[in-house]
Each structure stands twice: as structure tokens, then as C-alpha cells.
Amino acid sequence: MTALENTPSTASIRQKVERALLFLLLVTIIFTFPNRPGFDLDASWRMALGKFFLENLQFGRDIVFTYGPLGFLMGKTYSGLLFWPLLAWQLFAACVIALLLQYWGQRLAAGWPRFFFYAFFLLYGVTYEDAIHMLVIALIGFELLRRIDRPWHWSSSLMLLMLATQSVAKFTNLMLAAIMVGTVAGLALWQRQRGTAVRLLAWFGGGFLAGWVLCGQNPLNLPVYLVNSWYVSQGYQEAMGIDTPDAPLWKALVVSGMLTAYMLLNLITQKNRPRSLAGSVMLGAFIFLNWKHGFVRSDGHMVGFFYCALLPIVAFPVLLEDAVPFGRLKRWALAAAGGLCLLGIRDAIPPLVDSALTIFQNKIWGNVDFASRLATLRKDYDDALGQELQMYGMPRIQAVVGQRSLDVLGYNQAVAIYNKFNYRPRPVFQSYSAYTPELARLNLDYYNSDRAPDFVMIKINSIDQRLPAMDDSALLYLLTQRYKYVLSEKSFQLWEKTAGPIDAAAQPQLLERKNLSVDETWSLESYNPRPLWVKIDLHPSLLGRVRTFFYKPPMLRLTIQDSAGKTEAYLMPAPIGRAGFIISPVIDDMMAFARFASGKSERLSSQITITLAPEDRKYFSRTAHVELYGLKSSTAGQNFFKNITKELFYMFKTTPVDFQASSKPSNEQINGEQVMVLHTPSEMTFDVPRGMTEASGRFGFLAGAYTRGGRTDGADFLIVWSDGKESVEVFHRYLDPLRKFEDRGLISFHVDLRKFKGGRLYFRTLPGPYNDLGWDWTAWTDIEIK
């Protein structure tokens, strides 16, 4: 080594280069390009948040959700809106987070401590959106605690503004940030540093209020935002829980116990007890909130807990500024907890551990590739949006609705965004989230008001094995009393608001009150065929309340037996039972709802039973208070059955009078055009009025029948004319798209009918020569008789 290489200036330059390269690496791995548009539950709410932001809808009043006005920045899903703002925020946030991580990393000892810190964030900590926000809030909070005895620095103000910005994005962020700032301010007051406490509260509170106003929100809505967000948060733990696998659960419990012991040991060994207590409160709140977030809905969310639990492990000893005593014991105990965290992550999502380096490399090179195509990147996203619109465009509904207001019941709000409808959502805009009496009332009040939308698109769906009628059930009933069915398109129904006030007779009428024991069967047959509404209030025991606070309640189920003897068990979260729902008829799909709305219900409930696993009964009262109400029947949906064939075959110009197929017909696409799939053998019957001269249309196979492993042996397409006495085959074509390229796509046909007087046409598909029905995805479209 030369003397030049040993000079301080050379070492300083090398350090600066190393830090700059590390900064670039951190920014590259933290930065995330927007998600592409999607139609599923999560993509729908993420895109909807961006639309709500642009239209200045008031959070807490117009919108009640777990996210705030800036929530679209966390959702970061492209919907045709806010592309460049999403990119700008991601870049800004990535730079701030990278600087924060480097600031903390440099405080650790060089070597393995620093290596593990950066390795954790590069491989795990920044890969999960919710976790990185929690980690950033925690690191800022502990940095503010560390500075409490020092003169105020301008960077503290910037960090508090960052906390405020995070808090405007999500209510959970606000809770954690408020705990962090409040604890540090409380310690400052304890130490009689009133100026510091005032600055902390002023910068955070003022920053939050400024962000709220800059997002177009009325400050007077803040109280109702906090109250309604609290309802959502509290209802979440009772309504959104799912069964937890044993493997990650016991690891998380052990890790939580070890971290609790670490905090207590740290509290005992620190000389500055008030400061140590503040740090323990902050770390405890951080771990507890992420424990609840990860293990209430214990699917992929579990990794968020393990990521956050790793922070005090990889940031030891600087996070809590540990004293020397028991340092080795703490280090080895935390190392063991870190190993359990990695195993827990693997239990939840195995590839995150098994393929961590591959995921890391793919993220780096993926971002580099996207950045190299920045000039055309917006077009790529728009192309993806165009493909979504091809699949979910609603031209018939659009023609009816125009620019009048519309809401979407269910969780596929993307349909309103894609089609640029005048979307006016109810406050709890995804139906599965209206899971407490208070939240259900917000939606019902909206629909009972003058603000109720002119049209409603509805798709019956739910989550977690719930009975679909449990979600926004009061609105489902109100829809049949205040709206009327218009048409169906691509699995959605369109309903239009009727003129005049709601009939007072539509109010549910109390029929019976009783106490119903768990596992006791209650017969409803004496009330059939009247539509019924039920409220079920099963209170938790004291032990159940303790369990719910620290974890989540057990799974409560409702078993329903219908009039045909069919029995099904549905998950029934306790707050949904308290809110009430339609219990009879059994509404579990679109057809069942249409029958209910037309007074033609088939599946009536004959008896119900509240069920609990034997080991879970100690968490609830022995009996539930139940109330049964009668509902007014409706004929608002009767046009559904009048138009059902026409609606089903909407891509035909002439509607069949009858049809038969080996499986349920479905609307699909061939080369981007809507077709009716009728699996072989199938038959459609068309009337031929006198004077008709020709029949035309197109037919073919879905591409999946002959690509990507499809092995169709072809099919015969026939058209037969008959007047009941004689039959004439007027068209016959065998298609073999697997072997003949010219048989792919849509094939046109034309039949001359001038020699026939009236009668009927029978459109048939028959299996290929090997009678293999597995790939006979045969379809027709544009059928017209004129």
C-alpha cells in the first residue's frame, strides 16, 4: 500500500464514494414503479383512492376507510390518473428513506452489525409497503427520542413533517406516529423541557393539519375522520380475522416474549429510567401494532410483523441506546429471535427467504430496465389499462347511465374507474368493510339521503367464506325498495333509482326476540315464505375481550339449512351479526339476489344454528340475543327474468327462444370480440318469422382450446331449418383449429332463407371425431335473422 493511499483525504474520498454507492443501491431497491391496473379487490380500492383524492372527496365523511387522503401514494396503482405524481413521490420517499437508513447504519459498529442492518433492509425491510412505513416511523421516533437532551436542530422539524405526511396517508400510521411523538413530548415535559415538547407537538400537529388542508380536506372533518377511522380499525380485528397457521404463530409469540423480556431488561439496566421507559413504550407500541396487523389477517400480512420485529435486533444496541450490562446476553438472545423471525417469514411466504437474493436482483434490474424505458413507460401502462378496458368495458351500461351518478356494490370499484362513470361512492365503499353497525349505518344513511346515486352497479361477492348477503346487507334490501333493475352486463347488474319517497312499509317489522344458545337450532319455517332479517348479538366473555385486545376473537359461524335440506356453514363475524343481515332467502349469488328482488325466492332458510369450536366457547357468552324481522317483498327486479335470455345473448342481434348446452353458457372473447360459449353438444332455437330472407353470424373456438396445452379434436357447427314436419340442414362446417390455422378465430356464415316460410332454425354444435368434450369450447356471436 502506498503512502498516498493512507492519507486522510484519500480515505475520506473512499468513504464518500462508498456512501454514495450505498445510497444509490438503497434508493434503487426502495423505489417502486406503480402497480399496473387490475380488477381485483386490492387494485380496486387502490385506484379508487387516487380518484377520491383528485375529486376532493372528504375523508371521514364521504369516504371511510383505513387510508387517508394520501393513501393513493401507498396504494400506488395506475388507473389512468396521477402517473407522474406517483413516480415523483416514490423517488422522493426512496431518497428520504435511504438517507434515514444510512444515518442509522453509520451509528452501528463497522463490520457485522452494520452488514446485518443493511442486509436486512436490502433483502426484506423495504419489500413490503406497510412494513417500510412502520419502520420509517419507528426510526424517526427513536431519533427524536435520542435528541431530546440536545438543542433543537432543523432536521428534527423535517422528520416531524415526514411523520405528518405518513400520517395523512393511513390511519394506522397516524396512530403509531402520534404515540411516538406524544411519548417523546411527554418525556420532554417530565424533564421540564417545555419548549422541546411544544416544538414536537407543533411541528407534527401543524404538519398533519397543513397536509390535510393541502389535500383539499376540511379541517372541521377531522373529528369525524378520527371517529370513523377508529370504528374501521376496531371492527377490523373482529371482522377480518382468518385462521392462523401454527408454525408462524408460535414463532411470533416466542419472538414477542423475547422482545418483551429485552425491553424489561433494558429498562432495569438503564440509568435514565424515564428515558428508558419512553423507549420501551415506543418499541412496545411499534411491535404490538404490527403484531395485530400481521396476525389478525394472518396471510401474507404476517411477514410485516416479522420485518418490524427484526428492527430492534438489527439495530442493537443503538436503537434503545443500551447500557453495557448484560450486553452479550442481549445480543445472543436477540440473534436467536432474529433467526426465529427469518423462519417465520419463510413459514408465511417461503420464496421471501429461499429466493431472497433472486428477488433482490430482479428488483434491481427490473427498476433499471423500467428507468431505461422512461420515455415510453407511460404508454406501456396505458396499454395495460386498455387491455383491462377491453375485458371490463361496459358499453351498454354506459349508454344508459351517461354522466348521471353511479355507485358500485361489492368490491370491484375498478369497473367505475375504467369506464369513467360519474362514480359517487357510499362512505364505506367496499361492501365487505361495512362490518359494524356504525359503518353499515353510514352507508344506509347515504342511500336514504338526497345524495343517493342515480344508478347502482351490483356484483354479489364476498370474502372469507361469508354469506354474501352479510356484506352491506341493509343496502341490498334498500336497493329492492328504492331502485329497479335495468340490465345486466358482464356479471354486473344495473339498477336505477325510482322517483318518490321510500315506502314506510319497507321498514323491517319485528317478528320475534329470543335468546339463542350456541349450537341450539332455531326453526324459521313458520315464517316462510316471507323474506327475513336477523340480528345476532353474541357478547364476548371477559376472557374473550382480553383475547380480542391482545390477538383476535375466535371464528364464529352460522349454519343455515334451507327448505330443500341443504346445509352450509358461513363465517359470521360478531359485529356483522350485530348489524344484521338478510337471512331468508339465502342470497349467495346474482341469480339468488335477482329472485329475492323479484319476489321469486327459491332457497328459503328453514333453520339456523350459531356454531363455535368447543375450545372457543369460553370466549363468548352462552347465549346470543337474536331478533327476527320481516321484510317487504319486492318486484323491482322482475325485468331481470323478462330479459334474461336477451341479456345473456346480448352479443346477438336476434335472441334465441331456447337453448341447451352440456355446461352453463358463458360470455367470453375471441380476438377481442364478445361471444357466447356453448360447450358441445349444444343447441339454440330461433324463430323464423315469415318474410325473413337470411341468417348470418360468426362462430369459432376459444383460443385456449388449441393453445397453451389445449388439445381439441374439433367440432361440427350445424344449422338446421324445421317447420315441425320436415328438417333441412342449411349449413355445416367442421372446425379443427388445433391442426388448421384457417379454422382459428371467428368464421363468418350466411344462410339463404328465401325458400323457407316461417319455421325455426336450430344452431347446433357436436363433438369432434374422438368425442373428446374436454376442449370443445365452441362459441357463436352476431347471430341475426332478417
Image (cartoon, rainbow, N blue to C red):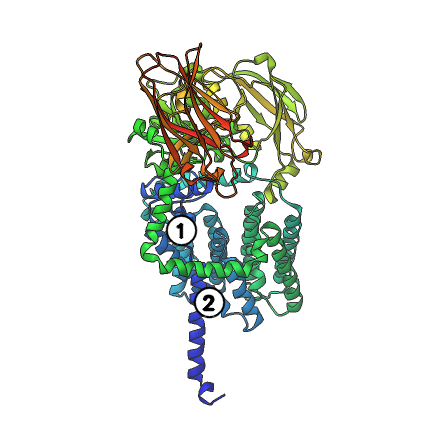
**Residue at the image position 39 percent from the left and 57 percent from the top:** 370
Quadrant for the C terminus, please: top left
Q: Measured from the top left, where is residue 196 in percent x and y?
A: 43, 60
**Residue at the image position 42 percent from the left and 66 percent from the top:** 24
Q: Earlier in the sequence, mark 1 or mark 2?
A: 1
In terms of image quadrants, where is residue 654?
top left
Front in this rendered view, residue 545 or 335: 335
Front in this rendered view, residue 523 or 182: 523
Residue 34, labelled with which disc? 1
- Side (left or right) of 509 relative to 542: left
- How packed mark 2 is, by other alpha carbons closer than 10 Å (few <14, some 14-19, many 20 or more), is few
Q: Note whether 573 is above or below 371 in the view shown.
A: above
- How packed mark 1 is, by other alpha carbons closer than 10 Å (few <14, some 14-19, many 20 or more), is some
Of the residues shown, which amino acid type is indicated by label 1? Pro
Q: What secondary structure is found at the residue carrying circle 2?
A: helix
- Judging by the rendered image, the residue that carries numbered circle 2 is 103
Residue 602 makes an appearance in the image: yes
Q: Measured from the top left, where is residue 116 in percent x and y?
A: 56, 66
